Amino acid sequence: MLASLVVTAGMTAQTHTLDINTQKLGAPIPSTMYGIFFEDINYAADGGLYAELVMNRSFEFPNHFAGWDISGKVTLKDDGPFKRNPHYVRLAPSGHTDKYTMIENRGFFGMGVKGGEDYRFSVWARVPDGGKAKLWIDLVDNATMGDDQKLGNASVEVSGKEWKKYTATIRPARTFARAHLRVWGDSKVTTDLEHVSLFPVNTYKGHENGMRRDLAEALEQLKPGVFRFPGGCIVEGTDLATRYQWKNSVGPVENRPLNENRWHYTFTHRYFPDYYQSYGLGFFEFFQLSEEIGAEPLPVLSVGLSCQFQNDITRGKKEDEVHVPIDQLQPYIDDVIDLIEFANGDPAKNQWAKLRADMGHPAPFNLKYVGIGNEQWDYKDNPVFTKRLKIFLDAVRKVHPEIKYIGTTGPDSEGDKFDMLQPKMSELKVDLYDEHFYRNEDWFLKSGNRYDNYKRGKGAPKVFAGEYACHGKGKKWNHFNAALMEAAFMTGLERNADVVEMATYAPLFAHVEGWQWRPDAIWYDNLRSFNSSSYYVQQLYSLNKGTNVVQLTMRGKPVAGNPDQDGLFASAVYDKNTDEIIVKVVNTSDNDQPVSLNLKGMKGKHEGKYTVFHSYDLVAENTFDDPIKVVPMTGKTTFNTPVEDVVVPARTFCMYKIKK
Ligand code: AHR
């Protein structure tokens, strides 16, 4: 018996023998199996992963000075150099030697800056009357009791009537989470400013239009197999005009138009009136990031339906007013085809592929999957979704049969919508369909067998569990027990890797001051971040996904928390790269469970490792103060084979890796 795992309190008498057939390899585990779902919710893009520190840098928010304080003579103009972002500001001399013209940006809940690190200030500027002007740029701490608010400063000299980009580096003397950026106008010369920007130089992989390093590294450390973007509901829009439009998110950042962010107003109890999408983190950056973290990119595009929750045609809204009329779908279909060209096409032959090359990536991104539609559904008397999806599939398959197209079974894990859509996805021969389940503990405990009897084999679409998380009953936030439920459920994903091709926990990111939806995988403020307990479950699966399923049964049945299985869930894989059998066992009961690992086909002693993920406090969670409160612990051990006896403590996820 593994001494390190022996806990006797509350132990049940019965030993559970897990028969693990190490001699026969089962289905290959898809490389995409465990991935990530990104949506600009909870300030995940602007104010989060996207490292830009200035909010409303192009003065295009409906309130053009949102995020800015102004003093002196500042006026808004609208004939700027960037067609799709025409507004800019004119800073005129104040008219008095002791008065100043200045604009000050508050960032997203302030700007997090680190002492001794470099920040790249940039601005498009001109001197409308000709000549030269000097701009002073300060990073400030408005709350200081010190003599000087400045944390660091720089200046730029602007010259001539033509718009040009100017840059300067600022190195703040100390770390501060809520800095503001001040730009002082010249005291004698009028200056025009557009696209005022501040980025850390130290972004992920050093890109100028880059990602916040700690957050991107947290993604990299998940080793995700697939990266779904740009969401969620954001794909659909509250109305068609506000859906995510990828073509607006590529090309020079200065000319990417602003979009509303639906999470600004979706919940009146978590309302964020200054939440917009700059599209600075756009499709090029999503593809680039996918490549850099080693994940298959998975863009999801609109199927011509706005959010069906908010545009209910059974309650008075007219289909052709809120959704795209059937005979007007072509531009939406073109969006899919052009996106595939943008990602994979030949720059010499296609304008979108050429744009990709112009943006710095002549080689293809090797896109293999495209999702069409997010949480869509049909009505009994009107297949609003599938009639559109069919038109899309017929059209896009003709041009790009090499791509795998992903449909959806709607927002529910079961019920009318799901039951209606699942067979239709087979009829339409989608390659995969996207299932969503934000459900409570009971659902997770009862769903261990969910995929055991799914249609499999030739012609059956694969499953993309595209959004899921345990939303605890009365505890809809991150905590250990919710993560444990997810771990238990995921044994069923793993066991059914021949049916489930990919799964992405959702959502990914949340700013502690700007969230609308929880639980989430990774939390952060302006300077710090920590991973939730759910993140660690995802990571345990992803880093230990193996290459093939190995059959694991208890008394001939899959171990999925069934009534006679004492709250146990289990699965096993083989990793041909490391020659290891990896067994995952989750004990969701309140009793410690003695378990015999019967590694059929193995003999003698084998080196290995065990990992234990446990918290005595079921509602414990990681925090900024204690970011490693709920994390897995790993140790080395020797396993007896064919049989090793272990104890899986109550409410614990254990993993055993045994060298073959
Ligand atoms: O993940 C948050 C939201 O949940 C997504 O936008 C949507 O697809 C789902 O309803």
Image (cartoon, grey):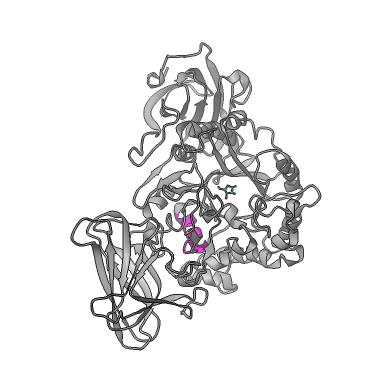
Q: Is 547 situated left or right of 377 in this image? A: left
* Residue situated in front as seen by the camera: 538 or 418: 418
Q: Can the viewer see residue 322?
A: yes
Q: Residue at x 56, y 69 (%)?
A: 353
Q: Residue at x 43, y 58 (%)?
A: 50
Q: Quadrant of residue 148?
A: bottom left
Q: Is 350 situated left or right of 222 in this image? A: right
Q: Position of residue 474 (x, y in %)?
A: 53, 33
Q: Can the viewer see residue 221?
A: no
Q: Position of residue 620 (x, y in %)?
A: 41, 32
Q: Quadrant of the N terminus?
A: top left
Residue 289 magenta-drawn?
yes
Q: Quadrant of residue 192?
A: bottom left
Q: Residue at x 57, y 56 (%)?
A: 234
Q: Residue furthest left?
A: 147
- The span picked out in magenta is 279-292
Q: Quadrant of residue 465?
A: top right
Residue 281 magenta-drawn?
yes
Q: Position of residue 594 (x, y in %)?
A: 49, 17
How many numbered marks have been drawn onto this rendered protein structure?
A: 0
Q: Residue furthest bottom?
A: 130
Q: Please name the predominant secondary structure of the magenta segment in the image.
A: helix
